[in-house]
Image (spheres, rainbow, N blue to C red):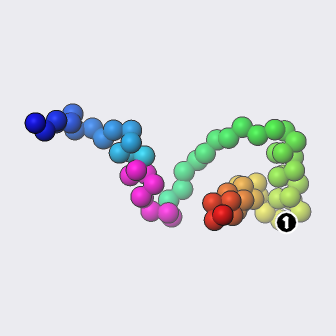
């Protein structure tokens, strides 16, 4: 017997679909970090004439390539 779905994708289906979407799309992500780490990231951004988002994005991309 085949089980019928209610027509809504499951959480797993949604997660798989979101991973398979275009890599060009962006989302907003919130994380909790210590104040001291935030200060270090902010200072690095100032030293490199960039912004915090770029520093964090590049660090995450570098980490994911490992």
The residue to which callout 1 is attached is 48
Left or right placement of residue 50 versus residue 5 in this view: right
55 part of magenta stretch = no
Front position in the image: 7 or 3:
3
Question: Residue 5: percent from the left, percent from the top?
Answer: 21, 36
Question: Residue 21: percent from the left, percent from the top?
Answer: 42, 58
Q: Quadrant of the C terminus?
A: bottom right
- For the view shown, which residue lies furthest in the left direction? 1
Q: Quadrant of the N terminus?
A: top left
Q: Is residue 53 above or below residue 4?
A: below
Residue at 30%, 41% in the rendered image: 9
Question: Image quarter for residue 14?
Answer: top left
Front position in the image: 50 or 14:
14
| Mark 1 burial class by Cα count in 10 Å: few <14, some 14-19, many 20+ | few
Left or right placement of residue 33 versus residue 15 in this view: right
Left or right placement of residue 63 versus residue 48 in this view: left
Residue at 39%, 38% in the rendered image: 11
Residue at 50%, 59% in the rendered image: 25
17 part of magenta stretch = yes
Give the residues in magenta.
16-24
Question: Residue 59: percent from the left, percent from the top?
Answer: 72, 59
Question: Residue 63: percent from the left, percent from the top?
Answer: 68, 59
Residue at 72%, 55% in the rendered image: 56
Looking at the rendered structure, the secondary structure element under dot 1 is loop
């Amino acid at each position: 017997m085949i089980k019928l779905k209610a027509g809504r994708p499951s959480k797993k289906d949604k997660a798989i679909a979101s991973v398979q979407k275009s890599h060009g799309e962006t989302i907003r992500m919130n994380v909790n970090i210590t104040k001291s780490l935030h200060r270090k990231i902010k200072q690095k951004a100032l030293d490199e004439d960039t912004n915090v988002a770029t520093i964090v994005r590049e660090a995450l991309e570098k980490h994911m390539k490992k």
